[in-house]
């Protein structure tokens, strides 16, 4: 092989490798400075029919920004993003954020989802741009979050909770029975 041929061959082999862009990240994954304190409640995923009922109760559309506080493996952020909404999931457990990252990508909605590894009680994780907040925590945690939800969310924002109310201090406006559980809905006044 002549010298020019060898150079041309080498160029053909090397340039395509150089030209291949780095793979895009699955989606925005943000690390907050949250300490590694233990989670407040274990992971139990919301099943799809219940996730759909929550989206319906909150009337989630493409114009919404949906925050799932304690997002687990991403079931609710995926349901919201499939409706065209922008969704943000926060979870304290790095394994859940890893699973959510994979599932969001598999669902093809990574361009509309941001995942934050952090504590939902950390005031540095602001929730003020949410128009909808989804919860599947515990009644005691909903009650602890209620002052944040009332003070940080704009008037008209909706909150939906799988299985747990906010106690007597903040009765729900709507409830729906779905698959043996209850979904609760509130609007910030
Ligand atoms: C019952 S699971 C609900 C998961 C998801 N929202 C769903 O409905 O499928 C509760 C989630 O909250 C997370 N979690 C518990 N305490 C938390 C905290 N202080 N900050 C952020 N996430 C928390 C857990 O790691 C778990 O993934």
Image (cartoon, rainbow, N blue to C red):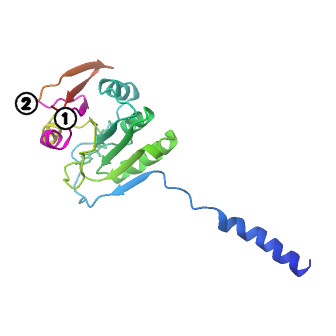
Q: Is residue 43 visible?
A: no
Residue 29 at x, y = what percent? 39, 54
Residue neighbourhood size for the residue with mark 1, other residues' Cα within 10 Å, grouped as few (<14), some (14–19), many (≥20): few
Lower sequence index among marks 1 and 2: 1
Position of 29 with respect to 58 (left or right) is right
Residue 142 at x, y = what percent? 17, 37
Q: Is residue 64 visible?
A: yes
Query: Dividing the image into 4 quarters, which one contains the C terminus?
Result: top left
Which residue bears the numbered disc 1?
155
Q: Is residue 28 magenta?
A: no
- Checking the image for residue 10, the label placed there is none
Residue 169 at x, y = what percent? 7, 30
Position of 20 with respect to 75 (left or right) is right
Query: Dividing the image into 4 quarters, which one contains the N terminus?
Result: bottom right
Instruction: Specify the segment rendered in magenta.
Output: 146-168
Position of 113 with respect to 16 (left or right) is left
């Amino acid at each position: 092989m002549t010298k020019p041929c060898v150079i041309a061959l080498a160029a053909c082999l090397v340039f395509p490798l150089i030209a291949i862009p780095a793979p895009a990240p699955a989606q925005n994954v943000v690390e907050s400075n949250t300490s590694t304190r233990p989670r407040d409640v274990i992971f139990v995923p919301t099943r799809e029919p219940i996730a759909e009922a929550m989206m319906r109760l909150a009337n989630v559309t493409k114009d919404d920004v949906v925050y799932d506080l304690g997002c687990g493996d991403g079931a609710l952020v995926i349901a919201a993003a499939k409706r065209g909404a922008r969704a943000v999931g926060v979870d304290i457990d790095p394994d859940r954020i890893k699973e959510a990252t994979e599932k969001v990508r598999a669902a093809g909605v990574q361009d509309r989802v941001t995942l934050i590894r952090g504590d939902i009680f950390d005031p540095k994780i602001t929730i003020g741009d949410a128009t909808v907040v989804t919860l599947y925590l515990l009644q005691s945690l909903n009650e602890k979050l209620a002052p944040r939800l009332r003070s940080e969310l704009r008037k008209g924002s909706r909150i939906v909770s799988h299985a747990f109310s906010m106690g007597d201090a903040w009765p729900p406006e709507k409830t729906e029975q779905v698959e043996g559980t209850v979904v609760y809905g509130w609007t910030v006044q």
